[in-house]
Amino acid sequence: MVETRRLCGALGAEVSGVDLSKPLNEDTARGIVDAFHEHLMLVFRGQSLDPGSQIAFTRLFGEPQEHPLRTRASVDGYPEVLIIETRPGRIGARNDYWHSDISHRERPPAASILHALAVPDGLGDTMFCNMYRALETLSPGLQRLLDGMEAVHSAEVTMRRALEKGTDALPIESVPPPTTHPVLRTHAHTGRRALFVNPHFTVSFAGMTREESAPILDYLTEHSTRPENVYRHRWAVGDVLIWDNRCTMHYAVRDYDDTVHRKHHRTTAGGERPF
Ligand code: SIN
């Protein structure tokens, strides 16, 4: 068992009494994984993780992975630890769109972890929404329509972002072929079904044109990101957040410019092929 406190009605819990820089005993590790599956997103305050300990913590949820497109710098000697940073004179690549990390991969990451190292006062929050609930609150008719449908996920936006001037995004050579995933995804551990489309990487439904797909995808985004389905995290240095990419989307609020310092280390844990 670990001590948790729910953060809001939508998703998320704060875990207390755990030092993630130390090896976790079996009970604590199991308690954290159970809380993760129950709450979809966990916050640990006041942590101080070096890259090796962040990788060790990530392994609790799946095999730590390098970013497949290497669009950001990583920590020297730790290719699995991405540096997400804006500092005076150097703005970081944008993440201000609702997405589930790297959903264009055949096996997208199960979980992502951010550790806050520098936080601009009151700026640069990150928002999360609950995609189980997004599905459960659709009408039975729309749920039936989406059941059995597949959607096409593409990295073309990542290529476009890499071409934008003035950010730290690293160039990528080519866009990998798009991937198709079920629109209603079953979570490998909880068995619950979640809506698995996002407005960043999902470009259409399989067998439909982008124009035909757009109104439905737009509706699903609007529905999923209603305020009552969203948690907004205000960062403090030392926070470690972990979220489940199989049943959440997230959005990094870009209300700052290149006069501030905001820095996180990000790791991802590998996941299964969506089914
Ligand atoms: C991300 O989308 O992985 C980064 C989120 C953030 O910078 O808050």
Image (spheres, rainbow, N blue to C red):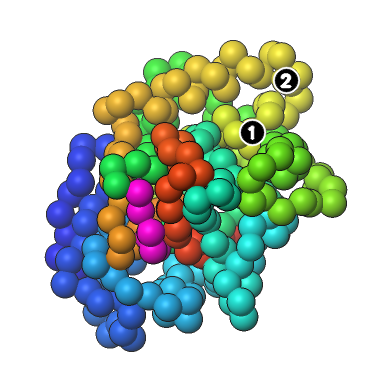
* Residue located at (27% from left, 28% from top): 228
* Residue located at (59% from left, 13% from top): 215
> Residue 184 colored magenta?
no
Front residue of 122 and 229: 122
Residue 264 pos. (x, y %): 45, 59
Q: Which residues are magenta?
A: 115-120
Report the Cα–Cα distance between label 2 and label 1.
10 Å
Circle 1 crowding by C-alpha within 10 Å: few under 14, some 14–19, many from 20: many
Which quarter of the figure is the N terminus placed in?
Answer: bottom left
Q: How many marks?
A: 2
Report the amino acid beneath label 2.
Answer: Arg
Residue 141 pos. (x, y %): 46, 16
Quadrant of the image occupied by residue 240? bottom left
Residue 59 pos. (x, y %): 47, 74
SS under mark 1? strand
Quadrant of the image occupied by residue 175? top right
Report the amino acid beneath label 1.
Answer: Thr
